[in-house]
Structures are given as structure tokens and as C-alpha cells.
Amino acid sequence: MKYKIMTSLLASALTLGGCPTISTVRTSVDKEFQFADVQRVVPGMKESEVITLLGRPKAFGMDEQGKRYLIYQVTKISGTTGSISTPLAMGATTSVASRGFELRIQIRNALVDRVAYKNYAPS
Amino acid sequence: MKISKITSLIASLLALAATSGCTVSRFSTAEGKSFEIGRVSQIKVDMHKDAVTAAMGPPYATGVDLDGNTYYDYQYTVVTNSGVGGGIVVTGYSGGISTQGATMHVVFHPATEVVKTVQYEISGPDNYEKFSMGGTNK
């Protein structure tokens, strides 16, 4: 009897209940570096020195004013999803939060001109 | 007997939890229309719209901005998600995301149809080596 009750409860939990999902997604980077390394990127530094320090950028480009830039992104997005599924209704709720930082380095004449960054959840 | 059945049920569930649900996944999403990334540096201010099309091919999208300028958008990006996930009662996933490709936005003077501004962004560390031209395309 006890066995049947336990089996039923487990079956109910798996078919009617919600299964929480915990996920972590990192941005792929060429080289791992810390936020402290960002402070070492200063105007006048050579672009090649930036690459040595931080690795190849996630992206590079040219803005509307014709200014060249490099983009670095070292972020980790953590998420939790709770869901419920029954024969009559189903639903889910997800919460996500980013950690890490993003960096935009403006280049002029192959030298660092300006540096901007965004730090998620700084400690 | 009862204890034996319960023990065997728990053991089965633990075995199931330990052996199932561990999946390696890799999903790629491509967006836009393929174009030659190496040609973005050929597009310069004052170039005619026809010359842009000749160099880059037809755009992915065209439009008119709030200032009345016409523009061409070139885009081809591939976002790849890869990781490992699994579990039964609680599901976990750990993975990485990477983007390869490029976008380019070319704005034209409405009257003369020559390039007014051009901006682009090329994604992917490998593409930095291929297309950054040693940082000389200021």
C-alpha cells in the first residue's frame, strides 16, 4: 500500500508538477581575463598591446563617425526557469541575470583613444 | 518485503537520475543574407549606391531613416549555442554562446544617392585576424 502511494506521488510529481531548470551560458572569449585587466587599457596604448593583454576581441568595427572600435564581452548569464504542466494548463516563469563586463575600446591611428565599459552586478 | 521494494524503487530512481538526461547540444541560428565580409572596407563615403551594390551585392534590407535618408543594411550572423544539460527533477544547463559574421549599415544622401555614412561590425575572434587589416583601417 505504502509502495503504491509513493509510486503515485512520484508519478504525479513528474507528470503534473514543475521541473525547475537552472542554466548558465557564458560568452565565448578568445582569452580569459579579469576586470582588473581592463584598468590597464589606457589611452595611447597600441592596439597590438591590447590584443596581447585581452586577446582577440569578440567583435570590431567602424562607427558612424568612421572611428574604429573593439568590443570585448566577458559575461555569464544565469537563469532559472520554473514550469508547471498539467493536462489542462501549462506555464513557465524565467528569471535571468548577467554577471561580468563589456568593454568598448575606441581606436585612433592604431592607438587606444577612449575606453568605455559596463560592469554587471559589481561587488 | 515492503522495505526491499522501497529500497529497490529508490535505487532505480537514483540510477535513472545518474544515467539519463545528460545531453550535449549545439544549435546555430543564422540570420540575414550572406555577403563578402572582406569587402566592407571598400565602401567609402561619397561612393554611389550602384557602386555599393556592385561591390557588396544586393542588401539584406533597405529603408528610409527618420531624417529621410535611404539606407542599405547588410547582415549575416551566425549565433551558436553549445553546452551540456540534463537532469530529472531539477534540470541544469551549462553552455557557451558565440557569434560569427558581420553587419553593415550604409546611409545614402536622398538626392544624390552617394554614401553619407558607413558603419560596420564584424564578429568573431577569427574574423579579427582575417579582416582587421592590422588595425590600419581607421
Image (tube, rainbow, N blue to C red):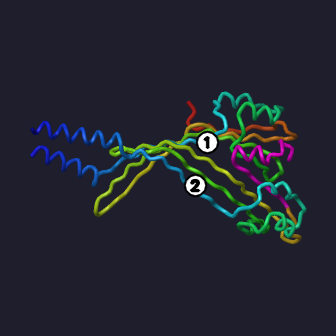
Is residue B14 shown left or right of residue A109?
Answer: left
Is residue B18 shown left or right of residue B32?
Answer: left
Instruction: List the residue tagged with mark 1.
Output: A28
The reply to whether discs 1 and 2 touch (Cβ–Cβ < 8 Å) is no
The residue carrying pointer 2 sits among few (fewer than 14), some (14 to 19) or many (20 or more) residues within 10 Å by Cα, namely some
* Picture residue at 40% right of the left edge, 46% below the top: A21
* Label 1 residue SS: loop
Q: Is residue B74 above or below residue A101?
A: below
Residue B90: which quarter of the image? Answer: top left
Instruction: List the residue tagged with mark 2.
Output: B28
Q: Amino acid at mark 1?
A: Ser
* Picture residue at 71% right of the left edge, 67% below the top: B61
Residue B10: which quarter of the image? Answer: top left
* Label 2 residue SS: strand
Q: Amino acid at mark 2?
A: Ser
**Along the viewing direction, whichever of B17 and A74 lies nearer the viewer:** B17
Residue extending farthest to the bottom is B111
Q: Is residue B41 above or below residue A100?
A: below
Is residue B120 shown left or right of residue A83?
Answer: right
Q: Is residue A34 above or below residue B1?
A: above
Q: Which residues are magenta?
A: B116-138
Report x, y in % for residue A100: 59, 37
* Picture residue at 83% right of the left edge, 42% below the top: B135
